[in-house]
Amino acid sequence: MVRFIELIRNCLQDVKEIMPWDLLERRKENPDLLLLDVREPVEFDAMHIRDSINVPRGILESACEWDYEETLPELVKARQREIVVVCRSGHRSVLAVHSMQVLGFENVVSLRTGLRGWNDYEEPLENRAGELVDTDVADDYFTAKLRSDQMRPKVQL
C-alpha cells in the first residue's frame, strides 16, 4: 500500500515544481500564462491568486477534455500553453500536473508550497468579491486544524 505522501513523491519524479518567486517572474515574462487552482470552490472563493481559474481536482480530467459537462474550453485548448497549477500546500497540484501530463499537456508545472507559500512570500490573495485578503487572515486559514479523530492513533507500549 502506498500512502498519500508517497504517492506525491512518486509523481514528483515526472512533475516540475516552481517556487512563488518563480511564478512572479513567469507571470511577468508570459502574460498568457494560465494559473489553474485545483482546490474546491469554497476554498477558491475564500482566497485565490488574482486571474486564476478554478477547476476542482475531482473534475480536472473531464474539464480537460471535450464532450463532458465539466469541459472548460479554455483549459482544453491550453495543451501547449504555459500552465501553473496551484492548491493549498502543493500536494494536490502535483497530482493534477501528473494527470495533465498524461492527458497531453506539454508545459504544466506545480507551485511548490502552494498558496500557503505564496502567502508566506507576502504575495496578494483575493476573495470571491475581488477584495484583498489580509495576510494574517490567510495565515490562519492555511494553518491545519485537525480534529482528534483525524490524527493517527497513538501506539501503546
Image (cartoon, grey):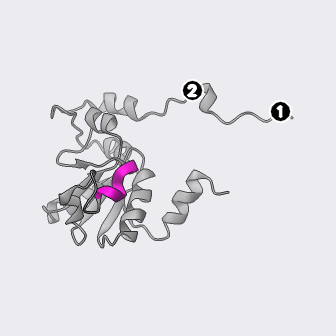
Which stretch is magenta? 57-63
Quarter of the image holding residue 102?
Answer: bottom left
Residue bearing the label numbered 1: 156
Q: Say which residue label 2 marks.
A: 147
The disc labelled 1 sits on which kind of residue?
Gln
Q: Is residue 155 visible?
A: yes
Any part of residue 19 in sight: no
- Vertical relation: 123 (above or below) 98: above
Tell me: residue 88, above or below residue 71.
above
Q: Is residue 89 magenta?
A: no
**Element carrying mark 2:** loop
**How many marks on residues?**
2
Front in this rendered view, residue 83 or 71: 71
| Residue 61 on the magenta span | yes
Tell me residue 21's x, y (percent). 28, 56
How dense is the environment of label 1, judged by Cα within 10 Å: few (below 14), some, or many (20 and up)?
A: few
Residue in view at x 29 percent, y 49 percent: 55
Q: Is residue 142 left or right of residue 7?
A: left
Q: Position of residue 26 (x, y in %)?
A: 22, 62
Image point 31% across, 66% down: which residue?
Answer: 108
User: What quarter of the picture does the N terminus occupy?
Assistant: bottom right
